[in-house]
Amino acid sequence: METDLKSLARNAAQGAQKLAQVKTAAKDAALRAMAKALREEQDTILQANTKDLEAGKANGMSNSLLDRLKLNPQRIEDMAQGLEQVAVLKDPLGEIDRGWRHPNGMEIKRVRVPLGVIGMIYEARPNVTCDAIGLCLKSGNGVLLKGGKEADYSNQAIAQLLSTTAYENGIPHGVIQQLPGDRAMVDPLIHLNDYIDLIIPRGGAGLINYVLAHSTVPVLETGVGNCHVYIDRSAEVDMACRIVLNGKVQRPSVCNALEKILLHRECLPSHMGPLLSELSAAGVQVRGCPRSVAFSPQITPATESDWGTEYSDLIVAIKVVDSTDEAIDWINHYGTRHSEAIVTNSYQDSQKFSQRVDAAAVYVNASTRFTDGFEFGFGAEIGISTQKLHARGPVGLPELTSVKYVIAGSGQIRE
Amino acid sequence: METDLKSLARNAAQGAQKLAQVKTAAKDAALRAMAKALREEQDTILQANTKDLEAGKANGMSNSLLDRLKLNPQRIEDMAQGLEQVAVLKDPLGEIDRGWRHPNGMEIKRVRVPLGVIGMIYEARPNVTCDAIGLCLKSGNGVLLKGGKEADYSNQAIAQLLSTTAYENGIPHGVIQQLPGDRAMVDPLIHLNDYIDLIIPRGGAGLINYVLAHSTVPVLETGVGNCHVYIDRSAEVDMACRIVLNGKVQRPSVCNALEKILLHRECLPSHMGPLLSELSAAGVQVRGCPRSVAFSPQITPATESDWGTEYSDLIVAIKVVDSTDEAIDWINHYGTRHSEAIVTNSYQDSQKFSQRVDAAAVYVNASTRFTDGFEFGFGAEIGISTQKLHARGPVGLPELTSVKYVIAGSGQIRE
């Protein structure tokens, strides 16, 4: 299997060198043809998906997981539209983002180029297969996809259709490779430094931490979000409740959902009551620090492990703090550098919080739920980077590229 | 020792959070004070350096290594001037490189911030200690330095003086930490993911490959350069000889020095003679492919391992190729993605070469020796990145930073 993987990866790398030279118009035409094929061949994909769903049911998969796995005509239409949206995005390749003349007359340009080959390791819904293929194709990268085994029939059907259609529309052979959805593929994949330029793991903390600890290929860390809202003493009650509710309840399973509330002690009497009644009405289980617990029997004691946990569920933990400084230090200690928010009317605290909190996205008086490539106007995203290297925040097309310097001389040598 | 390292790293991380908030003027004043201290305390540093030199001689260190290790008043003055140059460079922090308004009225800004803590692992001359400290301080990063044991007295003296002076001039405690120059420090250092954001190895291929294979902290790969000059059939003989000589002879030990010559077969009769006589006059040993060897007894046969080797010495290998395409494929196969050059008068070949060669810097009619932060006008550099992630080419101050998104709202929630 490892030998097969190596030759697949070599094919992807060779194909990617050719893909780097394919014109934007040809890539966009291929993306549109791929969208069309998805619509026309939707039955094939739905049949494959049915096999995954039946296996899932037989293995006792939960209803919420079955729902994430399930495809239907609307979800396939969404995937097709996603490809068409990528087709209209600006091609990042070839952009000259800097250029100048050396004193000796040479022209130095910095030109945007593809990364090469990207390895995607993911556990999520089958639409990730389609999204990743579209973004990698447009940004000129080859892609090796390793999805979850519970979605393998669906992923294979989608990738097979899209790669065949891409090839028929002039995209070089080998640039789209769906690997078996087998956990045993992960280890060889994350050590293929000769052919793979970047590994993107998408899924739970277990997968991401495993890849970070073991990969010798550079990794783009995505997605774990233990996000906080700090309610400053000057926060308006209504705004605080609105931002907390939206962060926690609108879609609790995603990485930019709210997980922790930090409440300035001076707000305890005025803000805790309304917050609790709204959270309770929305079915949210509330845990808290001793001062929170003392306020209301509705709050159960939080343990140390709560403060570092991403619940991804209708659970929230509340901590009472004495100052904005304490809130900032708390977030920098327990946070995952994803999305952090302050609700305040103080100019000084808003400045301090946005300057000192170390996270991909820092919000003043807005919901953490906005950290998203579409909300940021990038048109698409392959994940949210929580690392500082290469890309931070939503990862769109430009973040899937690198640069090179091209120097045009007339015989210059170094003195 | 590992516990000590952890607490040093924690100090560096805590100091770095404070350093991120220190104003540019204060950092620049500290850098100037550090330059002054270097000049005033030069005897202390020279005494420490003498200990390293004596140990080196006793251990049979080669003269060229002793020369790299040796400090003198001029080299200390160069280090001091280096710090003063960094003081006048633009502070990259706080730059808002993008900003826009979300349709719902939120303002989204992308702001440049420090990486955090950088771990430098290096084997080179003691001036690297000073250069790295200056660049990390200005870019707001803490730094843990692990130099070579043969330069440990010098490195410790330099770092001690600079960190004390920095602290006396308002730089937070702990941000500059010189570790013992002990190989055993490498392994714990490259696994300190909780406190270190980036590892930069500088030295030979052995060190760099070890760090790449074992580090769980993200790595910036620097420096190995198996650089080629391809002499196209339309190349002027004089220009080709000038660029080859400059690349090979001006400073053979550096990473942007020339290591391989690819010669179009149509140039063999006209260009090989002049090239060989100039290389020979400069004392360069020449190896070659069978067609080169057949041309002159001065050329000894190259083995397969030659083609992938960075000699860093007065040795070069010549390969005759049949076309520009073959030269490009050869470079993409054997090159290290550092600096690659073509000498040509063909517009078409110059375009093809610069588009298709995959390297940090691609030259048309100029010497590979220009890949350098100073030559590129960056004012300083901490190394040359040969990876595609995060930074490619010379790594200056902006490449030592990350970004964060700061979003200013008025109560917005996601629908």
Image: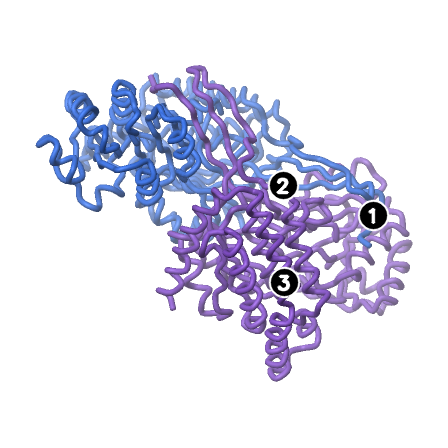
Chain colours: A blue, B purple
Residue A86: percent from left, percent from top: 50, 23
Report helix, strand or loop for mark 2: loop
Query: Distance from label 3 to label 1 (Cα)?
Result: 36 Å
Residue A54: percent from left, percent from top: 23, 30
Q: Nearer the viewer, mark 1 or mark 2?
A: 2
Write down the chain letter for disc 1.
A
Report helix, strand or loop for mark 3: helix
Per the rendering, the mark at residue B38 is 3
Which amino acid type is marked by label 1?
Gln
Residue A331: percent from left, percent from top: 33, 40
Between residues A25 and A258, which one lies in front from this camera angle? Answer: A258
Residue B301 seen anywhere in this rendered image of the structure:
yes
Determine whether A16 is above or below B13 in the image. Answer: above
Residue A90: percent from left, percent from top: 57, 23
Which amino acid type is marked by label 3?
Leu
Q: Check disc 2 and report the residue beneath it.
A: B90
